Image (cartoon, coloured by chain):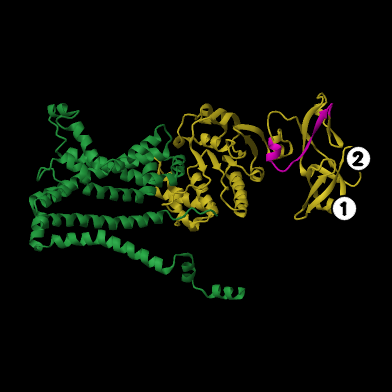
Chain colours: A yellow, B green
């Protein structure tokens, strides 16, 4: 089931939670809504589920306009951040709930319900826990029950609100894998909300980066990570080094050095900021025209990537650089040494009214 | 020195560690004795006195006092009033708590304040309000007489006065409970395709059942014991509009002390039973509040 979000706006009092959101989601896609708290991502998810009403705009499931259809009729599976399992029901009854509350004519028989529930419990590997109460399960197990419960009603759309937010790092990673696999097996259109960029990039087919009620960028994980279209996305997805300087006829002058910014060849004498990912900065022993000298302040050696903290000699700003271990050994770098750094890939933004 | 301290710690029992953090033993004993003496003097002693006085003139007088037609009628009326008011207030309480905790609307805090009003206002005033509205000289008096409806000095008036006085109990109990529980369980139920009514029956009601019962118990206790408001609207017609508390007062005023205390002992028994049930429920409520939703 594809989802079309057309011109959705929502405000709570004076607070504009969503501002004219447009988004198309293809059938079978797994989409992450990524943004800081207050960016409107959860509001959007709740509007799709019908738990919240939009002030304007429309939502279509396939060809059908469901804007004014109640949650009950929308056939969405919703997984809550804190699971929202029914405390007074066993795991079995929780999963069976959606089937048991159907009107008599469409309700499956007891045997069918039992079969279906046990099938789902084996899918989430909790068959042995059918008679337990939610309070006797761990967080990860509870979230799996919540997923099984949502899937029991065979939803056309699966919506997950910070599904792994309340879990510890290890369980989180396992569940992430598991969700990805589940999605690949079932091909159900899914949207999940997260503020964890790693989670979004790791799991989703497409990432929708949101900020202050607006969509900043939509793209595959590679696209949004490699080619952020705004300073916000640069900051929100991973670490970034800033080169603040003046842009003049296609060159960004910054402290002692100059880099090319060909797309701004027409710009004359403007304040601008260059954004460079830590792994897009090269370290060299020899000086060149577009490099700048810096002192190695700290070396972090754990893992396959070596993280270096450098201090620029010209303006004292800190730089974060990542190099491979191999490259690091070849250069034979040591803390306190003078080296030359050179941005390999730099994207220039002219600051507008946004603040960073 | 340091070594000594360490040894002391390693050998000290848990009770000693507790004592370290609490008041000196003497202070504790004084406080406990004071509290017990106070309770004994003002609660246990009068209660015992009621039962002693009730059986003062023998079991025959006691039985006569509580099986006397006026007494039986008072007991019946009290139970009738309780059976009318408690279910109504339970429904109102659930509805009000639901509205206050699950929805946002204008005038919400006003509603909460109004629910509390009967606690703040003297029961006598609660009774007088109905007299002003429904008595022969009241606002709707002529209309009621024209249609031959009797409210004041009759059962409807007593029920209304009791209803007003006991209004806050259930709602007050449920509002904080439902506030802590939030609305996600209900939302989960809706996304699973349940109707609003099924959600209420299968999800909300089980979540609030102990709190609701607790509110109902408190409400019943008050409905049985209410004196002031009922006294104003009842008219004290023997065998007709006397509830148990009013009946006791009349007996007492007629110097039938043993009979008065006999009925009073019956009411005390009600109260004690209520208290026991209340405690059991309190224990259950605490259990249902236990942190089952821990984060892993």
Q: CA distance from mark 1 to mark 2?
A: 19 Å
Does residue B217 appear to the left or right of A172 in the view shown? left
Which residue sits at x=22%, y=49%?
Answer: B225
Q: Quadrant of the C terminus of chain A?
A: top right
Which residue has dot 1 on it? Answer: A330
Whether labels 1 and 2 share one chain: yes
- In percent of width and height, residue B289 lies at 42, 53
Which residue sits at x=28%, y=40%?
Answer: B121
SS assignment at label 1: helix
Does residue A249 appear to the left or right of B62 in the view shown? right
- In percent of width and height, residue B242 lies at 13, 45
Mark 1 or 2, which is nearer the eye? 2
Does residue B229 appear to the left or right of B179 in the view shown? left
Q: Residues within 10 Å of mark 1 (few under 14, many from 20)?
A: few
Above or below, comparing residue B55 to residue A98 in the picture: below
Which residue has dot 2 on it? Answer: A288
Q: Chain of mark 2?
A: A
**Which is more N-terminal, label 2 or label 1?**
2
Above or below, comparing residue A109 to residue B258 in the picture: above
Task: Say how many tags the image has.
Answer: 2
Q: Nearer the viewer, residue B109 or A276?
A: B109
Q: Chain of mark 1?
A: A
Q: Nearer the viewer, residue B295 or A46?
A: B295
Q: Nearer the viewer, residue A6 or B269?
A: B269
Which residue sits at x=21%, y=56%?
Answer: B268
Q: Magenta segment, which residues?
A: A232-250
- In percent of width and height, residue B109 lies at 40, 36
Q: Can the viewer see residue B196? A: no
């Amino acid at each position: 089931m594809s989802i079309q979000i057309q011109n959705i706006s929502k405000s709570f009092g004076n607070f504009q939670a969503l501002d004219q959101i447009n988004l198309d989601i293809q059938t079978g896609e797994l989409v992450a809504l990524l943004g800081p708290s207050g960016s409107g991502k959860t509001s959007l998810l709740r509007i799709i589920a019908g738990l919240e009403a939009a002030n304007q705009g429309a939502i279509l499931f396939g060809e059908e306009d469901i804007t004014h259809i109640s949650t009950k009729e929308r056939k969405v599976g919703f997984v809550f951040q804190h699971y929202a399992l029914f405390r007074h029901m066993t795991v079995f009854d929780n999963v069976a709930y959606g089937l048991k509350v159907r009107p008599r004519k469409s309700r499956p028989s007891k045997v069918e319900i039992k079969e279906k529930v046990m099938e789902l419990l084996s899918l989430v590997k909790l068959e042995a826990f059918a008679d337990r109460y939610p309070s006797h399960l761990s967080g990860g197990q509870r979230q799996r029950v919540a997923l099984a419960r949502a899937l029991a009603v065979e939803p056309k759309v699966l919506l997950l609100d910070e599904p792994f937010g309340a879990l510890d790092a290890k369980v989180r990673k396992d569940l992430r894998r598991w969700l990805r696999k589940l999605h690949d097996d079932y091909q159900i259109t899914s949207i999940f909300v997260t503020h964890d960029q790693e989670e979004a990039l790791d799991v989703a087919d497409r990432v929708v980066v949101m900020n202050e009620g607006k969509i900043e960028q939509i793209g595959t994980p590679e696209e949004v990570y490699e080619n952020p279209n705004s300073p916000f996305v640069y900051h929100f997805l991973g670490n970034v080094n800033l080169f603040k300087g003046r842009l003049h006829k296609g060159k960004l002058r910054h402290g002692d050095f100059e880099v090319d910014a060909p797309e701004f060849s027409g710009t004359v004498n403007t304040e601008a900021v260059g954004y460079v990912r830590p792994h897009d900065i090269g370290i060299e022993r020899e000086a060149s025209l577009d490099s700048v000298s810096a002192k190695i302040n700290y070396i972090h050696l754990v893992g396959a990537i070596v993280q270096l903290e450098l201090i620029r000699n010209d303006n004292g700003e800190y730089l974060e650089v990542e190099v491979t271990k191999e490259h690091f050994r070849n250069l034979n770098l040591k803390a306190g040494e003078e080296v030359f750094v050179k941005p390999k890939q730099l994207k220039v933004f002219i600051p507008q009214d946004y603040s960073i | 020195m340091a070594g000594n301290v360490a040894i002391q710690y390693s050998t000290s029992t848990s009770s000693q560690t507790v004592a370290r953090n609490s008041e000196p033993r003497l202070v504790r004993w004084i406080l406990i004795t004071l509290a017990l003496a106070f309770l004994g003097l003002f609660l246990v002693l009068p209660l015992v006195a009621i039962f002693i006085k009730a059986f003062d003139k023998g079991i025959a007088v006691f039985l006569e006092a509580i099986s006397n037609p006026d007494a039986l009628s008072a007991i019946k009326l009290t139970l009738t009033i309780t059976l009318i008011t408690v279910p109504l207030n339970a429904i109102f309480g659930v509805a009000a708590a639901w509205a206050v905790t699950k929805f946002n609307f204008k005038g919400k805090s006003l509603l909460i304040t109004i629910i509390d009003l009967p606690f703040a206002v003297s029961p006598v005033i609660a009774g007088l309000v109905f007299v002003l509205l429904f008595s022969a000289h009241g606002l709707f008096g002529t209309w009621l007489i024209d249609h031959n409806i009797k409210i004041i000095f009759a059962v409807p008036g007593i029920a209304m006065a009791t209803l007003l006085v006991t209004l806050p109990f259930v709602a007050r109990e449920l509002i904080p409970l439902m506030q802590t529980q939030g609305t996600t369980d209900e939302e989960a139920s809706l996304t699973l395709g349940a109707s609003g009514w099924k959600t209420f029956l299968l999800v909300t009601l089980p979540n609030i059942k102990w709190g609701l019962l607790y509110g109902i118990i408190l409400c019943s206790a008050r409905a049985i014991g209410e004196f002031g408001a009922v006294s104003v609207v009842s008219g004290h017609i023997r065998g007709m509009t006397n509830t148990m508390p009013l009946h006791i007062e009349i007996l007492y005023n007629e110097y039938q002390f043993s009979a008065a205390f006999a009925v009073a002992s019956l009411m005390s028994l009600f109260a004690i039973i209520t208290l026991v049930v209340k405690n059991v429920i309190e224990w259950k409520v605490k259990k249902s509040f236990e942190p089952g939703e821990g984060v892993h």
